């Protein structure tokens, strides 16, 4: 019971912080909505779509990028959560939390789950707007995609946790975020199929296939159509485990202790 109270307190704090920052919620929706309303209109004519799994017929470009934009929301939400971790460490809140009489994996895991929940709330709001815009996916697909969205959020949150363990100053984190976010997003299948990238450059297509964000997007895409992409599931789960293990290693006391003179 005390463990549940501790985890509940951590997650409640993160959710309360998110709810108190309304501009963060609207900013999280602006990025994918700009892609959906503006860029998709221009790319629709330039990017011809082929019938590829899980689709059984030709689809509008807006329908194709919807799962990728859900992944975008999770990616930016994860980086925002990791930014708050760096801020907590600078203010001393993080160090105080890690001194609690609970395993380090438990405390960081609670932070990770809270960040994933925040991302899921933002994705749900985006899916509602996309549905009103005319992007109608299978009704049961929204429920089937919940585990895929949760696992993807945990994977990306673990990556953010790993980055927060390595970045010691808040002002340095913005550059690291851009170095991670934009390559992960654009070198993936979020905006265009990999076969399109293959036509342009086989090397870039190869990088896209190795990108764990690609597999997170494909896991969500297949789940929305009530299908399972086993390869993407395995890669996303393995990446989440590896990132979280490296984050735990990075948050060991000997590595989180500030250098002398700070």
Image (spheres, rainbow, N blue to C red):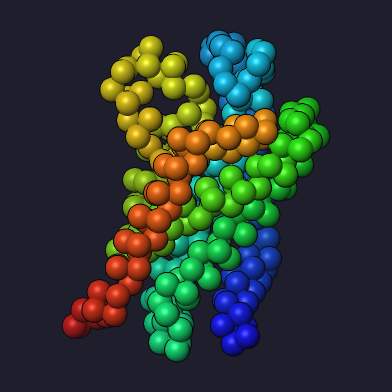
Based on the displayed image, in which of its 4 quarters is residue 231 positioned? Answer: top left
Residue found 56% across the figure and 83% down from its top: 3
Q: Is residue 231 shown left or right of residue 242?
A: right
Residue positioned 29% across, 68% down in the render: 249
| 241 relative position to 112: left or right | left
* Direction from residue 63 to residue 255 in the image, left or right: left
Q: Position of residue 50 (x, y in %)?
A: 56, 11
Q: Is residue 185 or residue 107 the one in the foreground?
A: 107
Task: Using the image as rendered, state which of residue 41 and residue 100 is in the foreground.
Answer: 100
Residue 90 in the image: state x and y as whole percent: 38, 76
Point out the image quarter for the N terminus.
Answer: bottom right
Residue 178 in the image: above or below residue 108: above
Residue 48 point in image, percent of width and height: 55, 10
Q: Is residue 150 above or below residue 161?
A: above
Q: Give the quarter of the image for residue 248.
A: bottom left
- Give residue 251's quadrant in the image: bottom left
- Where is residue 223? Give x, y as percent: 63, 36
Q: Residue at x 59, y 52 (%)?
A: 150
Quadrant in which the C terminus is drawn? bottom left
Instruction: Indicate whether 214 appears above or below 152.
Output: above
Res 24 visible: no
Q: Can residue 111 be seen?
A: yes
Residue drawn 53% across the image and 71% down it = 110
Above-or-below relation of 41 to 48: below
């Amino acid at each position: 019971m005390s463990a549940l109270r501790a985890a509940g307190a951590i997650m409640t704090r993160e959710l309360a912080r998110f709810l108190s920052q309304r501009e963060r919620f609207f900013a999280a929706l602006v990025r994918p909505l700009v892609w959906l309303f503006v860029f998709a209109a221009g790319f629709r004519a330039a990017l011809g779509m082929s019938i590829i799994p899980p689709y059984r017929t030709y689809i509008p470009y807006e329908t194709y990028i919807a799962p990728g934009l859900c992944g975008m929301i999770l990616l930016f939400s994860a980086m925002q959560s990791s930014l708050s971790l760096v801020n907590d460490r600078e203010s001393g809140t993080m160090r105080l939390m890690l001194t609690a009489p609970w395993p380090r994996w438990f405390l960081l895991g609670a932070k990770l789950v809270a960040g994933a929940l925040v991302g899921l709330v933002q994705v749900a709001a985006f899916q509602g707007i996309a549905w009103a815009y005319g992007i109608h996916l299978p009704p049961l697909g929204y429920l089937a995609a919940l585990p895929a969205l949760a696992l993807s959020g945990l994977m990306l949150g673990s990556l953010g946790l790993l980055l927060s363990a390595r970045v010691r100053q808040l002002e340095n984190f913005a550059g690291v975020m851009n170095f991670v976010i934009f390559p992960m997003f654009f070198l993936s299948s979020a905006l265009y199929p990999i076969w399109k990238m293959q036509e342009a450059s086989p090397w870039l297509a190869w990088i896209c296939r190795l990108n764990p964000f690609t597999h997170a997007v494909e896991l969500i895409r297949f789940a929305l159509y009530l299908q399972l992409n086993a390869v993407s599931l395995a890669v996303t789960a393995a990446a989440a485990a590896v990132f979280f293990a490296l984050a735990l290693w990075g948050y060991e006391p000997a590595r989180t202790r500030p250098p002398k003179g700070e």
